[in-house]
Image (cartoon, grey):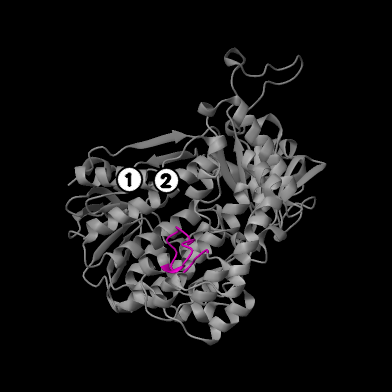
Amino acid sequence: WLKAASEAVREPRSCAYARSAAAMPPSPSEQRRRRSAPRLLLGLAPALLCAALHPKLSGLFASVDRAPRETFCSLRSPCSSAQLRSAGPCGKTSHSPLERVLYLTPRCHARCRGGIGASAAALAGAQRRAESPLHLAAKPLADLEVVIVGAGPSGLLLAHKLLDAGARVELLESRADPRNLDGGEGRAYALGLGIRGRSAIRTVDDALWEAIKPSGFGSERFQLHPTPTLKIELRSPDDGKGLEPSLLIYQSDLCGALLTELEARHAAGGRLKIAFKVRVESVDARTGIVVVQDAGGGGRRELAPAGLVAGCDGVNSIVRDAVQKACEGFSVTKEPLPGNLKVIRFAKMPEALDFDAVHAIPGSGGNSIFLEPTARGVCALITWRDAAPAAAGGAEAKEGEAAPVSLGDLTDAEAVRDALAKAFPLVADVVDLDAGQQFLSQKTTRAATIRCNTYHSARAVLLGDAAHSSGGASGQGCNAALMDAVALVDCLVEGANEGVDVALLAYSQRRVPEGHALLDLSLGPSDEVGAFKKALFGLSTLVGNVLSRFGLGTPPIQTLATTTLTPFAEMRRDREFFFGEFPTEAEFKKEVAVLAAASK
């Protein structure tokens, strides 16, 4: 198919040709291939039978066209996102909202003129020439006024895309401008942007991604240290199949870069307003009215009714409360995750650890530390569980020893330093009094998961952690939130002539399955499937990790999530044996549509 692809590049073909090509009579070579198929299947029958009996073995026989790759369809004739999703004759397109990002078979690549197996950088020129909804109409959302609550990564990317489409945007953030924060204040944790996050950012343009990259550190290495002397390589650069590595970046740096570009591109246009240290008191989903309290005890004011209020305001979302009031039947499940979390920074990686890898280190007493290299030192996420009293099942102190003390109970920097060095010997050389003081000054965080049955009602819509939070368990929260932003603007542009309500319905139907699937994959099989399947899942994951080191089997869930654009819902359905049944796409669409009709 390389020859076919080169011919396709030389000979322009339209979208209509791509969609009708499947009806062409088969060529002689195609006829020979079809005649040989039964013999091939007979030879592979034993292997296919093994794959069918064990879901994890199915990856051994995966087709090469499903290998992770960062490809963009480079169709040059005008076509909408809806057409792109159906352009491939085989119909094997990505169900993600990313514009022009497709999974196609080799034959589809030949007909659609895609850059087969090429990287996003190599296809940057073709991507810029590709037609998207934003290029079909100069300003398709010129009549839309949007209030975005929350200036995190998803809110800022949403602002970029809405402004590019012609909308007027007012951005409200309760915290200070991230560019003015000291290194230890707010948004202090590091994020990992994999293929999903960077592809979402690149839907604005490559220049935006290039403006962000210098603030991060590229790494595709992930190591687990069960003991100080044992190291397990869970992910290596080979797992990326030549893709650009994940970018490890502090949230404040990511937001700062997005914000700087946003102002440089749109501040002079008169369609962008940004307000920091503004607290949103209430949102009316039906009227689009937002009431805010200005910084420094300023006045309480009511904003003009907006055509859309986007909730990018995290786990404790005010906009989600508005959706719950406006939508009869709306449900949200918020479950706290066990343990406590604090973040500190080290100037360098400990000597005993590889400087360019992410490290997960279980410690003594139920503590753990997670180290990420960044462009500005090392981000260390420390988790611990409160010490239970002996009467409640906690460990009793041995004679002559002090009773166990939780990290959260410590009040002295020296005591924190000594406790961290004892719990994590591998990092003892970088734990100093400054680290102890950072630990004491940080507020304790308790993560929680969020699951909603719809992501919109009336004029309000939810993105990121406000809609679906995995509590950091997957490392994909930011990536999924950025994809939400792209999906929302896609739906608004595609439904520009049908109204916001139609666009928001399409958005919920597209993203709710992804949010539910990501949460399931992050937490693993529930107790409902039974102890046997949970144990079998753990064993199969371990075997999969080992086989993947040799290029065999299905890569681990984390690797698939980081290096492919395979929809989370598809990944979840492939693992129904371990996780239990997952609703079909049609079932999700029906449930969301019923909720939308009930809220009118």
Magenta stretch: includes residue 91 = yes
Q: Which mark is residue 454?
A: 1
Q: Secondary structure at mark 1?
A: loop
**Quadrant in which residue 469 is drawn:** top left
* Dominant secondary structure, magenta: loop
Q: Amino acid at mark 1?
A: Thr
Please tell me how many numbered marks the rendered image carries.
2
Residue drawn at x 64%, y 55% is: 62
Q: Position of residue 151 (x, y in %)?
A: 39, 59
Q: Secondary structure at mark 2?
A: strand
In the rendered image, is residue 246 in sight? yes
**Quadrant in which residue 502 is drawn:** bottom left
Residue drawn at x 53%, y 32% is: 338
Q: Is residue 44 above or below residue 245?
A: above
Q: Position of residue 426 (x, y in %)?
A: 77, 44
Give the residue at mark 2.
468
Q: Nearer the viewer, residue 498 or 519?
A: 498
Q: Is residue 89 above or below residue 553?
A: below
Residue drawn at x 55%, y 52% is: 189
Residue drawn at x 34%, y 41% is: 453
Q: Which mark is residue 401?
A: none
Q: Position of residue 140 (x, y in %)?
A: 27, 73
Q: Which range of residues does the magenta coloring cover?
A: 87-103
Q: Amino acid at mark 2?
A: His
Q: Nearer the viewer, residue 560 or 337?
A: 560
Real-space Cα separation, disc 2 to disc 1, in angstroms: 10 Å
Magenta stretch: includes residue 476 = no
Q: Position of residue 184 (x, y in %)?
A: 55, 53
